[in-house]
């Protein structure tokens, strides 16, 4: 007989489905070893006896898988929705208010939208970021007050739309998949999945302005100028950059709307990067771990670099900032400067493609950086579901 065991793959997937309603089968690897997680889902597609904490025995299927290709999706079985109370007393009520009568549309765009949000909260969950709306404090637009948690947290669009008394333009948050807070800052979150991001110029600028107001009222931060873009492949970042370079209206190009845009792959490597980017004062900690004080620039200059020694400029791409990378490439076109670029191994091929032979890449292992920053590496998570 099974139990809903905190920390198990089943428990993790229940937490996600209570908010997103469905999860793409192609992304189950975010939760751990893909074969183990898929085996768990397949097992729960058949009737199982599950012991609940109130001593009720649930004898039913837990998950159902439907759809084909990139629409293949995992959902809860209606008769088993009561199991959501095992993860939080308010989880079932939240689910039913978000997905009335447990009904889902077959519209592929709606499915893809749900999948984009599901992948984002899965990444946040695995990085230790609070994402459950029934745990978070509700956002508001009445007074300037610190409402958010002291620890990293993310709000999905459904939850920050609620603070508006009148209906917004239906497209204002179309591309946004979350608003992420961490000690000292915040990010507007997007998920391109495997498609080039289609930015909407002035519409996206309006989105940032609306979210800046939410950040100001609830986090006591003046503005939000940074974004995170998730994707299934590092090449998506390159294609997004190239697409942005085609824009004829530079003032609404995506790297002008957000001064920094951190690309994070939907993978275990991406989870590590997300943990770094949500540390308090993460940038200063990262720079201090890489360079001595005398190697770092004392002020702002006309070119992008992080340190200078041995007659070379040193640039770090460990934060995955593709907006800053565009500015670096513009500097390299001048051909007057010699650069070393520090990167993670999984970024190496992408940087070769984008920067060419103009730089020397210096890969550094993720484990080394995590250790320097005092971040414990995540242990194994491939245990079978508890009997």
Image (tube, helix red, strand yellow):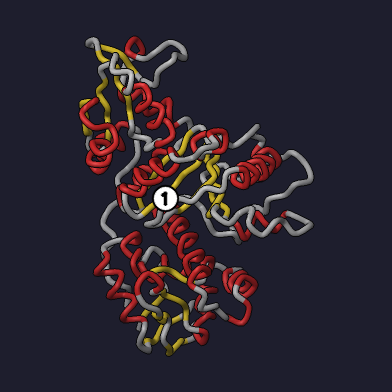
Q: Quadrant of residue 262?
A: top left
Q: Is residue 85 left or right of residue 350?
A: right
Q: Residues within 10 Å of mark 1 (few under 14, many from 20)?
A: many
Looking at the picture, how far across and down is residue 313, in whole percent? 29, 17
Instruction: Say which quadrant the C terminus sits in.
Output: bottom left
Instruction: Give the vertical position of 152 relative to 61 (above or below).
Output: above
Looking at the picture, how far across and down is residue 94, in whole percent? 61, 69
Instruction: Say which quadrant the N terminus sits in.
Output: bottom left
Q: Residue at x 43, y 59 (%)?
A: 119
| Number of numbered discs | 1
Q: Quadrant of residue 272?
A: top left
Q: Is residue 183 visible?
A: no
* Pick the front one: 201 or 114: 201
Q: Is residue 294 left or right of residue 163?
A: left
Q: Is residue 42 visible?
A: yes
Q: Residue at x 68, y 38 (%)?
A: 216
Instruction: Give the vertical position of 89 relative to 82 (above or below).
Output: above
Looking at the picture, how far across and down is residue 185, in whole percent? 55, 36
Q: Quadrant of residue 312?
A: top left
Badge 1 marks a residue whose secondary structure is: strand
Q: Residue at x 36, y 67 (%)?
A: 8
Q: Quick one: which residue is furthest to the front in this view?
A: 248
Circle 1 residue: 230
* Pick the front one: 375 or 64: 64
Instruction: Give the vertical position of 65 relative to 327 (above or below).
Output: below
Q: Residue at x 60, y 74 (%)?
A: 99
Looking at the picture, how far across and down is residue 88, in whole percent? 55, 67
């Amino acid at each position: 007989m099974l139990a809903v065991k905190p920390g198990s793959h089943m428990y993790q997937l229940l937490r996600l489905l209570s908010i997103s309603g469905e999860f793409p089968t192609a992304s189950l690897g975010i939760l751990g070893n893909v074969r183990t997680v898929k085996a768990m889902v397949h097992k729960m597609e058949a009737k199982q006896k599950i012991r609940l904490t109130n001593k009720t025995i649930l004898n039913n299927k837990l998950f159902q898988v439907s759809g084909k290709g990139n629409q293949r999706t995992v959902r809860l079985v209606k008769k088993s929705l009561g199991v959501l109370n095992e993860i939080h007393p308010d989880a079932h009520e939240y689910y039913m208010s978000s997905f009335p009568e447990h009904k889902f549309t077959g519209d592929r765009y709606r499915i893809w939208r749900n999948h984009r949000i599901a992948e984002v909260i899965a990444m946040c969950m695995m990085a230790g970021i609070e994402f459950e709306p029934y745990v978070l404090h509700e956002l508001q637009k009445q007074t300037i007050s610190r409402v958010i948690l002291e620890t990293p947290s993310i709000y999905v669009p459904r939850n920050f739309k609620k603070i508006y008394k009148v209906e917004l333009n239906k497209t204002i948050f179309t591309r946004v998949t979350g608003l992420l807070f961490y000690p000292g800052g915040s990010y507007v979150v997007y998920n391109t999945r495997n498609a080039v991001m289609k930015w909407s110029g002035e519409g996206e600028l309006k989105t940032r302005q609306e979210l800046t107001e939410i950040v100001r009222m609830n986090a006591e931060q003046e503005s939000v100028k940074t974004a995170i873009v998730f994707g299934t492949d590092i090449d998506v970042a390159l294609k997004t950059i190239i697409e942005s370079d085609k824009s004829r209206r530079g003032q609404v190009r995506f790297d002008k709307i957000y001064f920094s845009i951190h690309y994070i792959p939907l993978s275990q490597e991406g989870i590590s990067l997300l943990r770094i980017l949500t540390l308090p004062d993460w940038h200063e900690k990262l720079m201090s771990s890489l360079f001595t004080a005398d190697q770092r620039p004392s002020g702002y200059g006309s070119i992008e670099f992080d340190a200078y020694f041995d007659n070379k400029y040193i640039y770090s791409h460990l934060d995955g900032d593709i907006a800053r990378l565009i500015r670096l490439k513009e500097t390299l076109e001048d051909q007057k400067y010699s650069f070393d670029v520090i990167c993670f191994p999984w970024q190496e091929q992408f940087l070769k493609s984008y920067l060419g032979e103009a730089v020397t890449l210096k890969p550094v292992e993720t484990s080394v950086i995590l250790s320097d920053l005092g971040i414990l590496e995540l242990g194994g998570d491939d245990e079978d579901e508890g009997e």
